[in-house]
Amino acid sequence: MMPFTPTKPLRFGEFVALMALMSAMVAFSIDAMLPALPVIGVELSPGMPTRGQLVIPAFMLGLGLGILVCGPVSDAYGRKSVLLVGLVLYIGGALLASKAATIEGLLGARVLQGLGAAAPRVVATAMVRDLYQGRAMARVTSIIMTLFVLFPAVAPSIGAGIILLADWRAIFYAFVVLGLVSGVWLMLRQPESLPPARRRELSLRAIGSAIAEITTHRAVMVYVFALIFSFAPLFTWLSNLPVIFDDVYDRAASFPLWFAATALIAGSASMVNAQLVMRMGMRKLATFAFSWQVAVSALFVVLLQIDLPDPWNFGLFFAFMCSTFFTIGLTFGNLNALALQPLGHIAGIGASVVMSISTIGAVAVSVPVALAYNGTPLTLVAGNLGFAGCALGLLLYSRRFAAADMA
């Protein structure tokens, strides 16, 4: 047996660490670039330096395209081979980006890098579903989400440190190292999780049949829509927070520190969830979290009508921000596991469709709230109340058909 075709299953801790590393690749690839955007714009597009900001959307474009492809392909050819091909594309895109002489070349390389990053983002989730189900899957997902949430807190600092020591192009070498470590670890240690007997034919008919099954499955779609309203506050907060910290609280300079503290709190929520979910169950724990957030959001809508002096005003807002991100940490992994629970036989395309619908849906419902910003945190808090209320209503409705082992 070749050393890169292991058959012995990984221990729980090592498997979770490997899946977490690959799942966090997307967050690191986006947030580590943030400090470099102004420099990239000036260097590669001096006539229009704002084009440097397209580095992020270019990556997301490749990621979005890849998400729809990787799941079905991994259902047909196995998880491990698709992951390795994706990592090769990711590394190749990073190397091309590090040598780009024009902004167009850099953006093309970022699309390729995003296309490759879709494999670890989607297929890692499918691999977890292959090996775990129910509450055990929710526990694994919660631990993975801890690193996924923590990476945005530290990635900008890592990127800024690399720029300080070298230049912005060196950030792409960090991506290469990350891809190589993940690929070698996967190749040498992780067995294939989808045996040939469980694979599905890769055809338009088979893909169409799987999509129809997913989108007409009542339980799956209820949890997917709950995922939308669980994820939407994250997009709204990321859009509005820098402006609110500057306009309302005059703390723009210290915003990265406050955001890092919030991300740490959100990461701790995933760890708490990993401990509680085995006792309480996924749906019950998520229902409790959304009930709490509805109550807290309603309270803050009232408190915002009171003209409290600083730092009390800011302290209350920061507490609310931590509560929101903590709720996301208690719900995202559980809802994702609930949505994928009935899709074990099509876990790859199931992960693709669930991820695509929940991400696109969250963006769609969060944009109007973000654009409604009126110079106060009120629209953000009220939007949070609406999102949590919708998610709570969906989970209460799901009690009509939830199986006892998923409660």
Image (spheres, rainbow, N blue to C red):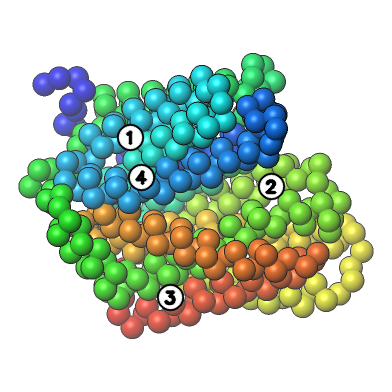
Q: Earlier in the sequence, mark 4 or mark 3?
A: 4
Tag 1 and tag 4, C-beta contact below 8 Å: yes
Measure the C-alpha gap from mark 2 to mark 1.
Answer: 31 Å
Q: Amino acid at mark 2?
A: Phe
Q: Earlier in the sequence, mark 3 or mark 2?
A: 2
Give the residue pinned by disc 1: 86
Q: Amino acid at mark 4?
A: Gly
Residue at (66%, 63%) from the top-left corner? 370
Give the residue pinned by disc 2: 259
Measure the C-alpha gap from mark 3 to mark 2.
Answer: 29 Å
Using the image, determine if residue 252 lies above or below residue 375: above
Q: Which mark is residue 395?
A: 3
Measure the C-alpha gap from mark 2 to mark 4.
Answer: 29 Å
Q: Please give left or right for residue 251 compared with residue 206 in the image.
A: right
Does any portion of residue 375 appear in the rendered image? yes
Q: Please give left or right for residue 379 compared with residue 148 in the image.
A: right
Q: Earlier in the sequence, mark 1 or mark 3?
A: 1
Position of the C terminus by quadrant: bottom left
Position of the N terminus by quadrant: top left
Residue 307 location in percent, x, y? 89, 71
Measure the C-alpha gap from mark 1 to mark 3.
Answer: 35 Å
Q: Please give left or right for residue 221 compared with residue 58 in the image.
A: left
Give the residue pinned by disc 4: 66
Tag 3 and tag 2, C-beta contact below 8 Å: no
Q: Which element is circle 2 on?
A: helix
Q: Amino acid at mark 3?
A: Leu
